[in-house]
Amino acid sequence: MRFGKGCVIGTGMMGPGIALTLALGGVQTTLLSRTPAGAERGVAEARRLGRVLVEQELAAALDLDIAGSTDFEYSIGQADIVIESGPEEMGWKQELFARMDRVARADAVLASNTSGLSVTAIAAECARPEQVLATHFWNPPHLVPLVEIIQGRATSPAAAAAVRELLTACGKTPVVVKLDRPGQLGNRLQMALVREAANIVAEGIADAEAVDSVVKNGLGIRMPAYGIFEHMDVAGLDLALRVMEHVTPDLYNEGRAPEFLRELVREGKLGAKTGRGFYDWGIKSADAVRAERDAFLVEVLRYRRRRSE
């Protein structure tokens, strides 16, 4: 399966970075938006992100084949792969995929950038569910190597393998997730950690700043060096078993989000966008946090490039 032309739907937080990824792999890419202004803005952002990669010596000089469009039927109909990066709303995605299914080529792959919705359900109204899958890019998509490829119940393994080959050629590190489960793979791991972190704060074991410090300066900073199972094997599975049996009974395991988190949401404390969450965002800057995140990721990627040379 050859992917010469691609289409990315959505020009918000994820779409431009995804379009850049395809273009870096030599795919002629269209960024589809509802408005000309949105399409123009999305292409400009994709090119800006490309310049960032060049400036940080993470990519060579770029000649990106990215264009904007508002023509749904043409943009979808000419693409070998379509990646949707719209709202995380099941009804919206089902309607969109049904529309795409009617105008896309029979051999085209239709993908969703969903971070946790069922790709099987998203494809429910499609006549070619074997060609539908999820490609979950992690934010920021131009810097994070991982892309999860999630197979729905009817997804063809050949389609998943072809997309994996494409994303590898685009410089990503794709992982195929074989079962369509809530949260996919990465977010299942992340939610287990988030759930316990919220519970630790709720029980008064430590405050949010202490929890974040443990993650940033302890377990989080070493995870790029080795994964969970590599760590367990190196430490010894006998030790891992003893620690797990001692700690697991005391972990939060209620099958729902901790009440403490629900209370914050009920009180309108939604985080940076409302000025208050676990932190006071009148003092702390969300833009500064994102800038620090991106700078750290750039250094990690540079280190990896040096190691591979």
Image (cartoon, helix red, strand yellow):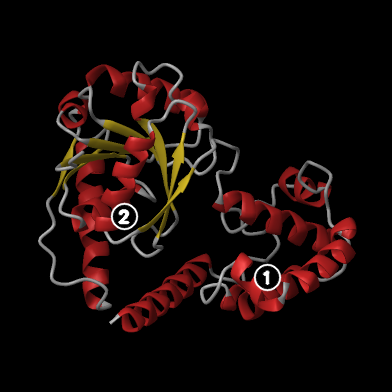
**Counting other residues with Cα less than 10 Å from the Cα at mark 2, is it few (<14), some (14-19), or many (20 or more)?**
many
Looking at the image, which is closer to me, 44 or 301? 301
* Residue 203 quadrant: bottom right
Indicate the amino acid at tag 1: Met
Q: Nearer the viewer, residue 67 or 177?
A: 177
Residue type, label 2: Gly
For marks 1 and 2, the one nearer the N-term is 2
Instruction: Write the residue at 61% across / 76% down.
Output: 216
Please state, as top left, top right, bottom left or bottom right, where the C terminus lies in the image: bottom left
Position of the N terminus, as image quadrant, is: top left
Q: Marks 2 and 1: in contact by CB < 8 Å?
A: no
Quadrant in the picture for residue 284 = bottom right
State the image coordinates of residue 52 (x, y, percent, origin top left): 26, 70
Which residue position holds label 1? 232
Q: Secondary structure at mark 2?
A: helix
Asked if one can make out residue 45 in the rendered structure from this viewpoint, the answer is: no
Picture coordinates of residue 174 (x, y %)?
Answer: 39, 54
Residue at 41% x, 60% y is 140
Residue drawn at the location 77% of the way across and 58% of the way down: 196
Q: What distance separates the C-alpha of mark 1 from that of mark 2?
A: 34 Å
Label number found at residue 254: none
- Mark 1 neighbour class, 10 Å CA radius: few under 14, some 14 to 19, many 20 or more: some
Residue corresponding to mark 2: 17
User: x, y (%) of residue 80?
Assistant: 20, 35
Counting labels gives 2
